[in-house]
Image: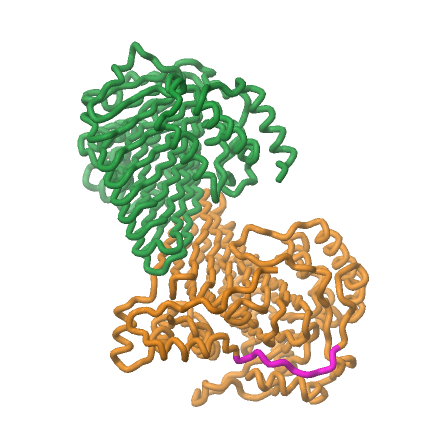
Amino acid sequence: MTAALDTSEAVEIREGVDRGTVETVQAMAGKYKYGWETEIETEYAPKGLNEDIVRLISQKNGEPSWLLDWRLDAFRRWQKMEEPRWAMVRYPEIDYQDQYYYAKPKSMAKKPKSLDEVDPKLLATYAKLGIPLKEQMLLAGVEGEAEPRKVAVDAVFDSVSVGTTFKAELARAGVIFCSISEAVREHPDLVRKYLGSVVPPTDNFFATLNSAVFSDGSFVYIPKGVRCPMELSTYFRINAENTGQFERTLIVADEGSYVSYLEGCTAPKRDTNQLHAAVVEIVILKDAEVKYSTVQNWYPGDENGVGGIYNFVTKRADCRGDRAKVMWTQVETGSAITWKYPSCILRGDDSQGEFYSIAIANNAQQADTGTKMIHLGKRTKSRIVSKGISAGRAQNTYRGLVSMHPKARDSRNYTQCDSLLIGDKCGAHTVPYIEVRNNSSRVEHEATTSKVDDDQLFYCRSRGMDEEEAVALVVNGFCKEVLQALPMEFAMEAQSLVAISLEGSVG
Amino acid sequence: MALPKAKEDALAARLAALPALSGKGWLAAARAEALARLQAMGLPARRDEYWRYTDPASLNAPEPLPAKRFDVTDEAAPFDGMDRLKIVFVDGVFDAAASDDLALAGVSIERLATAEEKDIHWAQGIYGVLEARGQTPVARPLAALNSAFATDGVLIHATGRASKPVSLIYVHNSETSDAILHHCIKLDPGAELTLLENGPAAARFSKVMEVDIADGASFHHIRLQGRDHERRAVTHLFARLGAKSDLRSFTLTANGRLTRNEAVVELTGDEGRAHLAGATVGDGGFHHDDTVFITHAAVACESRQVFKKVLMNGATGVFQGKILVKPGAQKTDGYQISQSLLLDEDSQFLAKPELEIYADDVKCSHGSTSGAIDETALFYLQSRGVPRRQAQALLVLAFLAEAIEEIADEAIAEDIRARLERWLARHGSKG
């Protein structure tokens, strides 16, 4: 284990910040809105990881034998793999045997037939998180729009999906939106065809682990030519202690379809670290478009770096058809450790990939995140805009790959990654890989690192803002290009999240 | 930690082809330490992070691959008309007849091969020392191999302002030569020295240069790596800079089968300044790799990296550059640009421009671009009556200009431009 970090460390007072401000801010530090726990009876699989656990998870989900074999293959392979060490994150050795791989509220023992049957405690949990599991007009903050927007939600609680809203209405449009365990039962052909086709079980240490033990997650299928009538979202909540969450999301956008998908996640405050190793696979066929937006707000640990989620995630979109489009937008504010590189395989000619990211690391958080743009098809385009903000003693790394293959003629990439440092004890790093293997493609990469501009801060302060507000405003300005790429509801949440995540960073 | 089997075998094979460690006194100790470093690291392999884009096999091999000598007959040797002190190595062997007397006002010059006799030597504080410092965080095994087995080199101590540049001339004569040279350069406070290097040196050439630049001193380095088609080279520049000191290094590479130029620069005194630049013209089976690591460990230092590569007929260009700003190195100004111009479909550019920053009051940026020549500009020039090949050469020169501008000596810069113009007029892409 790492030595406990020194808490008595004197906070350096900068010009123009009085002692009072610093103290108030320090008192607020570590404030995490979603750190409460739901008291609910939970059924666990025995601690540890072995073939029996893999079989148990498969059996709990009522899976066919091909999927069990698939899991077991992955598990056997995983046992021979080594945990990757190349990321700029430091953490004590993870004991994979000292945690639970399956946790399910006892009230979910019998799958509720409709949302009305779901344990009120679970419903209350989501309501408290601001995600009412009712088919009502969503969301707060968008009142006054001419036509209220609907968002369908799949709620995942520890290892199981609690319920999915608007299923009937979506079904009328031909859209399948359900938990992946349900999809395995109801739509086995689709799942079998696409599962593991973007992120194979051999992909990497954490993806292979996920392939062996994934418990639930969401499945989306948008049929040919359908524009999904509402936004889809999954909300992941880790509740049980010492339990890892391993969800798997599979999205298939058939030819000419469109969907916008949102993902949110939170966890209670605990002083032990919890593992989250998810896989998201997106298949995009000819002329289809998928927007995938994430607000990642797992518990980040306290201001001394105690506790927090270890977030090791593999996300990849495969633009298989011509003119397919994918857009990843992420706001990464939570987790003690973030290890995440949402990628785009631009296989179809004229396909497009975009990646917009805000990663905020405060206190003792460590983030190593970025994207991969693999250009295989002709005239493919990609764009990367990454904004990293480091504060406290945090380390924030952008790591990305842009690869232009010989056949990806006349392709384009533009990458911009900017880092902002708040305080002199944090770090901001940029590790891009640029591989250009043909000459008709153009690749441009720019990166800058700077601190919060004193003049801008002074201006805000002279207009009566306090230091915290001023920093939040400047940072929101810094992130503007990414915030604009988010769906509106998320953009508002993200903006306030930026401010909350930076609480305690001034000084 | 024990080395993986493959690395252990490769190292054993390489060491078997080298003579036993030689040298006396201080040098023997330095060589033994370098060998121990090498044995702990093993030789580089493709799987090592900083060798993913360059295959070190031909640099590791016990014997060099043969390389035909290339005689330049169509132009004057570089720096020809300049007043300079010439030191010539043929296939890594000092050529006394072709060299000037090693006497220069403001500078003392010795050869490594004869310096070991002295019990205490100023080079003791530099030889293998800066190289060893440069082994973390990234291992550079071929530099340690050089420190252990270098056969000769120059030790230059500048105590004041050197009255003229020191010019190292490397001649490649034998088809199978394998040269290992190691230079140490020390500049006292306020000293000034210009070092010129040119020539292909050998079929395979390993060179390490360790430069210690004291407060207020300034060191200019201009290197022309020759037009040889087949030679291979791995070179390392390790530089440590004191307060208000100045390092400028420029390298022009036009061909060679494989070139790996590493520069490891540490700014240890406030307000130091390091500018590194490279211009590369690669044609055909050519692989050129610039790997740069600049550490800012003091306040208000400035660093610039400007690397430009023109690649044609299947050439490969690699750039790996890093700016590391240590905690407390406030007011750092770090700039890095790496660009490639790909003149045809088969050429490729692989880059990893990195920033690692632990101080907040800094201004650091990097940019990297890659693409083909601007057809609109080409069309414009052609429409004004400039033939296509000449128009292309003009645009290529304009592209390389930013790197060449880093050369402080205008006469040398002009000479390099003129050479490039001639080469480009001849080469051109077949694509």
The residue closer to the viewer here, B30 or B371, is B30
A272 and B25: which is toward the camera: B25
**Bounds of the magenta segment:** A33-42
Q: Is residue A459 left or right of residue A480?
A: left
Q: Position of residue B290 (x, y in %)?
A: 40, 38
B6 is within the stretch colored magenta: no
Which of the 4 quarters of the picture holds residue B307? top left
Determine the main secondary structure of the stretch shown in magenta.
loop
For chain B, give the colour: green
> Does residue B93 sit above or below A113 in this rendering?
above
In which quadrant of the rendered view does residue A230 lie? bottom right
Colour of chain A, in one word, is orange
Q: Quadrant of the C terminus of chain B?
A: top left
With respect to residue A486, does A194 lie above or below? above
**Could you tell me residue A217's position as x and y percent?**
66, 70
Q: Is residue A313 visible?
A: yes
